[in-house]
Image (cartoon, grey):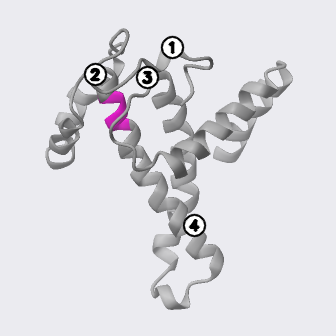
Amino acid sequence: MINILFFGGFLILIVLGKKDLAIKIVQSYFKTLFTKAFDFKTRTSNAWLYIFTVINIFVIIKTSSVIITISDISSASPVEIVKLIILVFAVVSSFSVLARRLHDINRTAWLLVPGVVFPPFLIILGFMFLLPGSEGTNKYGADPRSKAYWYLN
């Protein structure tokens, strides 16, 4: 069911003549996943947070089964090892995107720590992620909305 929803969204974009947008979304996802996974210093838009989160939930669901199947890493198949690597990058990049989103609203990424330690604080963070980003450059960098395809990373 998740496969149908996930790929259906991309098919709708292609049918609507937005093939370039579908390709840019996939490119931006992999860029975030592998090259910006450890970028906790810059900014990202709230639109990219939502797009990335939807795709990342799909990826985490598809790769999390590897945790159950691997009892010993030395006996794991190459496919299981690749799934594990992708899962690790997906989880780390999730925190990276959340930190960059907090930077976009001119807040410190250290606000994620209370959310991990004290889960009810996640509700407050959730509302903070809905706030619009600060206009122009702030202490964390340039406004992500100042470039073409600003809603992507």
Gap in Å between the C-alphas at discs 2 and 4? 32 Å
Tag 2: Cα neighbours inside 10 Å, few (<14), some, or many (≥20)? few
Q: Amino acid at mark 2?
A: Phe
Can I make out residue 1 in this image? no
Task: Look at 66% across and 39% down and name the residue there.
Answer: 27
Gap in Å between the C-alphas at discs 1 and 4? 35 Å
Q: Which mark is residue 83?
A: 4
Tag 1: Cα neighbours inside 10 Å, few (<14), some, or many (≥20)? few
Gap in Å between the C-alphas at discs 1 and 3? 14 Å
Nearer-N-terminus badge (4/3): 3
Total marks shown come to 4
* Residue bearing mark 2: 127
Image position of 55 (left or right of 26): left
Which corner quadrant holds the N terminus?
Answer: top right
Q: Amino acid at mark 3?
A: Asn
The magenta region covers 98-102
Tag 4: Cα neighbours inside 10 Å, few (<14), some, or many (≥20)? many
Element at label 1: helix
Residue 100 highlighted magenta (yes or no): yes
Nearer-N-terminus badge (1/4): 4
Nearer-N-terminus badge (2/1): 2
Nearer-N-terminus badge (1/3): 3
Gap in Å between the C-alphas at discs 2 and 3? 12 Å
Q: Is residue 73 above or below residue 49?
A: below
Place of residue 58 in the rendered image (x, y in percent of width and height, measured from the top left) = 57, 47
Element at label 2: helix
* Residue bearing mark 1: 146
Task: Look at 85% across and 24% down and name the residue there.
Answer: 15
